[in-house]
Amino acid sequence: SGVSLEEVLGMLKSQTNYPIGLTFARPLKQSTESRGWFGGGGGNKEEEIAMDNSETICVSAEAYDQLGLVLDTKGYWDIVVKDLEAVPGPFQALTNTFADKETGTINLSIESVNGEFVPSFANPQLVRSAMERGWKADTRVE
């Protein structure tokens, strides 16, 4: 017998387990067959995926609310990621602390883009254009 979905959620929600590193595996696509958790979706336990026939992704998080995972079960014991939900990143979380309590407006301004001073009369379109030019030229924006 394996670990239940409730036990896994309990482990993921426990702050004592953080920071955490997780590795997720997805079966490699075989010819025209759709990806399934078992060979061709037939549910044959002998063809269960393994790391050597899967693509993997590793993620780390400081807290459960940074994961955005929607988990489900497949078969009797397999726990799979059913969906991913958007989660606020560190920058968004930090800037939200500056938001006006009544309007929700974030009262910050951009001082420079790639070391170039942004004048007070610059509108959002000018700033965005400067950022896009910086990204196209250097694949980065500071």
Image (cartoon, helix red, strand yellow):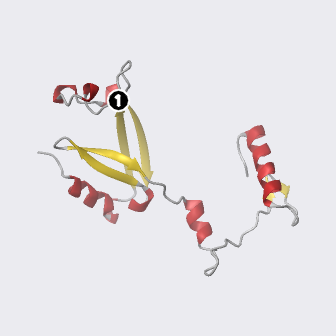
- Which percent across, then down, holds residue 14? 30, 63
Residue drawn at the location 76% of the way across and 46% of the way down: 132
Q: Is residue 120 above or below residue 27?
A: below
Residue drawn at the location 80% of the way across and 55% of the way down: 125
Q: Quadrant of the N terminus?
A: top left
Q: Is residue 135 above or below residue 98?
A: above
Residue drawn at the location 16% of the way across and 43% of the way down: 76
Amino acid type for the residue under numbered disc 1: Arg
Question: Which quarter of the figure has residue 27?
Answer: top left
- Which percent across, then down, holds residue 12? 31, 57
Residue drawn at the location 34% of the way across and 46% of the way down: 82
Q: Is residue 31 above or below residue 67?
A: above
Tell me if 37 is positioned left or right of 100 in this view: left
- Which percent across, then down, holds residue 137? 78, 38
Identify which residue, 135 or 21, lies in the foreground. Answer: 135
Residue of label 1: 35
Q: Is residue 96 above or below residue 50?
A: below
Question: Which quarter of the figure has residue 126?
Answer: bottom right
Tell me if 61 is positioned left or right of 11 in this view: right
Dot 1 falls on a residue whose secondary structure is loop
Tell me if 24 is positioned left or right of 109 in this view: left
> How many C-alpha atoms fall within 10 Å of the one at disc 1: few (<14), some, or many (≥20)?
some
Furthest residue to the left?
Answer: 1
Tell me if 117 is positioned left or right of 128 in this view: right
- Which percent across, then down, holds residue 2? 15, 46
